[in-house]
Amino acid sequence: MGKSLYDRLREYGTSDVYPFHMPGHKRRMGGNGPAALERPYEIDLTEIGWNDNLHHAEGILKESMEMAANVYGADRSYYLVNGSTCGILSAVSAAARSGGRILMARNCHKSAYHGVILNHLRAEYVYPQNLWEFGVYGGLLADDIAKLVDNYPDICAILLTSPTYEGIVSDIGEISVICHRRGIPLIVDEATGHTLRLGIIFRNRRWSVERIW
């Protein structure tokens, strides 16, 4: 296996090459920090030459995305720009045909609604359970999703948020089974769960606190 993206960025960042390219800080604003993020400006580079092209990856970025897919057990992995909003818009545009019907959780991020508007979609909503003990929305029930899919057989994609901002995790495993049986793409916004170790998981109208990873 070749060098990782991080290793190559570190090599360039610590070299004596002076950059006449973006970003404008020229790798000169380093500071102390954790070993993996020491002097982060040194590895903050744009897409130049050997650094590949994110929109048409053929080299170092392609290799890095393939490595990421292998880590997560996915068929493919794509790096995003402009935050997770870009991922939501891309996923909705790819999975739902223009003018089609999408089933989405009522507590989705506003970028999900932007995706609906931009693609002229008709939205059907599935409402999460209420977690009265904490005054927040709870998880989404697989049974509710199954009923809505049966009521609207023309649904072309399903969009959910799990975990939520409060750490609520729906039973995505069971929900994905429903989607797979019907051949419907399932989009899960997990943007707020990248550091989550414990989550409140809903199963069969009950909740429990469980370790996520």
Image (cartoon, rainbow, N blue to C red):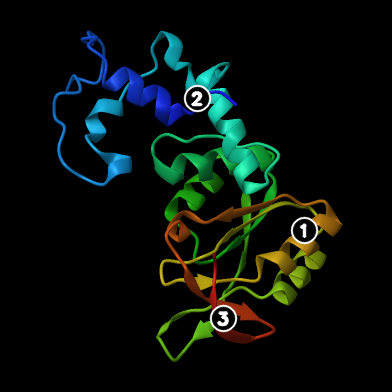
Circle 2: residue type: Lys
Q: The disc labelled 3 sits on which kind of residue?
A: Gln
Q: Estimate the x, y position of residue 12 in percent, counting from the top left.
A: 32, 18
Disc marking residue 127: none
Residue denoted by label 1 = 179
Residue to which mark 2 is pinned = 3
The one of 56 and 12 positioned closer to us in this rendering: 12
Amino acid type indicated by mark 1:
Cys
Spatial CA distance of label 3 from label 1 is 20 Å
Q: Is residue 54 above or below residue 117?
A: above
Residue 106 lies, with reference to residue 57, above or below; the image says below
Q: Is residue 98 visible?
A: no
Q: Quadrant of residue 179?
A: bottom right
Viewer-side label of 2, 1 = 2
Q: Which residue is mark 3?
A: 129
Return the x and y of residue 147 as percentages of the image width and height: 77, 72
